[in-house]
Image (cartoon, rainbow, N blue to C red):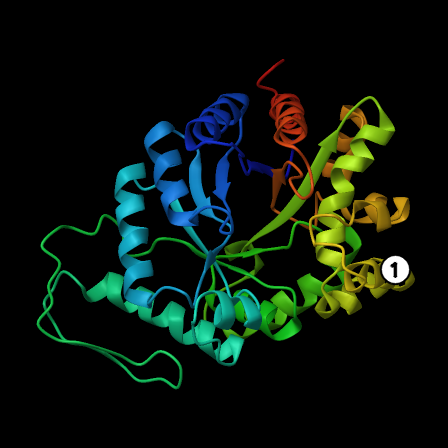
Amino acid sequence: MTGLHIGFQPWGETLEELVDAGRRAEEAGAEVLWTAELHRSATVTAAALAAGTTRARIGTAIALAFTRSPMITALEAVDVDELSGGRFVLGLGSGVKRLNEDWHNARFGTPVPHLRETIRNIRLFWETCTTGAEIRADGEFEPMRIRGYQRPFPVPRTDIPVYLAAMGPYATRLAGEIADGWISLEICSPAYLAQRILPELEIGIARAEQKNRADVDVVVSACCSISADRSVAYRRSAGLVGFYASVKTYADFFAFHGLADDQQAVIDTFRAGASSDDLADAVSGPMVDALTLTGTRDQVAARVAAYAGVADSVKLSPPTHGLPAAETRAAQEEIIGLIGDLTGARA
């Protein structure tokens, strides 16, 4: 598809199934295979995909930035980059405060300066770790002192691309300033991208030296549900929309799309005791239409095309929230077929 790079986030009940899906998506023309961090480790899954594929880039979307030390993140990145033959992309995100502090006992800090220091340290380690020189970096959140260390193995690249997931204006500006790419949530419309995200990215890009918009890969993550049966396609996507709508932090995002009341209905259901994976029935049709790529294959292809001119890349992923494995598997097969159509691999 002219002007858009097509990526895919494979799913599998087992790593074997996930890697097989990634391999078939690569054969269909996917340029990047992305891994998430929630039910699996993003970096371990990336390593499995790196070993099981040959051409597509392998990226984390995202690895949690604060639950590993910058040194461990840097080591995992160079190892996966080596395993993949230089195909790795390190996508990082802060996550939310509760997840960091309650689930991982990790310091959350103030996200934007904490991310800045984390990425600085990762890049500093890549540049220095084979020399034996002292690594010294001050900081409020990630001070780093490394003496007496020298990596005895080569680092294939010291300029592994670093992408940032961001929605708020300050984090988005940071992505424009210091990152090689920006990654959205799995719900991000072309209008929101054009009106809210790109202006903030431009502010960040303007702060950097010798950098322009072409230097930042804008990656839209898109939940994708394809079926000739409209009700099936919508039911699959609704659970993911409900998951995001249950988070009050995203109130401005839903209000931008005229969906504030729709979001509140989901929040009310969640507060009444429904789990975050059991909110599909509270999600309205307009929410699914506005925020996901849902419909027949032709309809979804047209929805993907709507990102041309505002995004550089689209990351397609099957819905998973509140669905049995068979439903996610069926959705995934449709996406792999769509990728072949979009890239011309099935022509």
Which residue is depicted at the point 31% across and 45% down? 80
Q: Residue at x 82, y 58 (%)?
A: 269
Query: Which residue ends up furthest to the front in the rendered image?
Result: 273
Task: Please provide percent x and percent y for residue 343.
Answer: 60, 25
| Amino acid at pointer 1 | Ala
Q: Is residue 71 above or below residue 274?
A: below
* Figure check: 233 above or below 110: above
- Quarter assignment of residue 254: bottom right
Where is the C terminus found, in terms of image quarters?
Answer: top right
Residue 52: x and y in percent read: 36, 28
Residue at 54% in and 22% down? 28
Residue for badge 1:
265
Residue 288's image quarter?
top right
Give the percent coordinates (x, y) of residue 326: 64, 26
98 left or right of 126 in image: right
Residue 291 drawn at (x, y percent): 78, 48
